Amino acid sequence: MSRSPRRNRAKTTIGVLLTGIMLFPVYWMLNVSLTRDQDMRKSPPDLLPLHGTLAGYRTVLDEQLPYLGTSLVIGLGTVVLTVALSAPAGYALAKLRPRGAGILNFVLLAAQMIPGIIMAMGFYAIYLQLGLLQSVPGLIVADSTLAVPFGVLIFTAFMSGIPGELLQAATTDGAGPLRTFWSVVLPISRNAVVTVSLFAFLWSWSDFVFASTLAGGGAHEPITLGIYHYIGNNNQQWNAIMATAVVASLPAAVILVLAQRYVAAGVTAGAVKD
């Protein structure tokens, strides 16, 4: 019994150390965002911004707001398109069980293994013909291709756990498959909707491969390209880069904190069957 408290303290200490190591890049990002240009090359660097400056954040407000707005539009559009496609597909695979469902599940898993740069090259050739290069709708469609396969798998797992008696009751009341899905299944699947929406938003918000390939040089560039524009061969504005990274991280961090309860329920849905 005397060893148990020691083991718990050791585990806690190790957990705190590992957490500190993983969070140190976040702290350093915040530290550099407040550091003056003339203090960037000090050796050793300051662990605290003793002579802090908000010049990087003023640069964000002056130059990066259009990029942030574009990323927000792309992120919300990706969420809407992903849920609109993956929720009905998950319902069909879970409850309607069409022919070839097993093959479709395999295709969805395989689709997630395709490198993003290969898909970006394919989209570039298609968009060049359709005139969708350097456009917000083009980026929304491209980012959705990453999120839809994951969303279908999550919705299928979640909706498989919905009692069949509930759907039978809706059918008895005269509801067809579409009405049952909209009025019964979708409201019950709130946790899965939040989970899929969160991951779709995060993927589109942090995307760089599709953005640089399909929207680079256009009038509507996301925040990842806004950060990239600060990096040059002879000019690297590190405080502006890190300040932009801090500001760009805030929406994702806030959404993740608010939605973590639903995400945990949505991801683990379907793992345990009665």
Image (tube, helix red, strand yellow):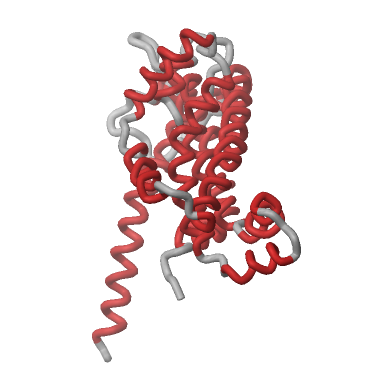
Asked whether, in this view, residue 58 is left or right of residue 209, the answer is right
State whether residue 150 is above or below residue 228: below
Figure quadrant of residue 1: bottom left
Q: Nearer the viewer, residue 245 or 265?
A: 265
Note whether residue 30 is visible. no
Pinpoint residue 117: horizontal percent, then vertical percent: 34, 24
Residue beneath the point at 64% across and 67% down? 168
Q: Number of marks in the image? A: 0
State whether residue 94 is above or below residue 57: below
Figure quadrant of residue 131: top right
Residue beneath the point at 57% across and 47% down? 87
Note whether residue 41 is visible. yes
Residue at the right extreme, as displayed: 173
Asked whether, in this view, residue 229 is left or right of residue 71, the answer is left
Asked whether, in this view, residue 64 is left or right of residue 272, the answer is right
Pinpoint residue 150: horizontal percent, then vertical percent: 44, 45
Q: Nearer the viewer, residue 272 or 181?
A: 181
Figure quadrant of residue 247: top right
Q: Nearer the viewer, residue 30 or 199?
A: 199
Pinpoint residue 112: horizontal percent, then vertical percent: 36, 39
Residue beneath the point at 31% across and 82% down? 5
Pinpoint residue 113: horizontal percent, then vertical percent: 31, 38
Residue beneath the point at 45% across and 62% down? 268
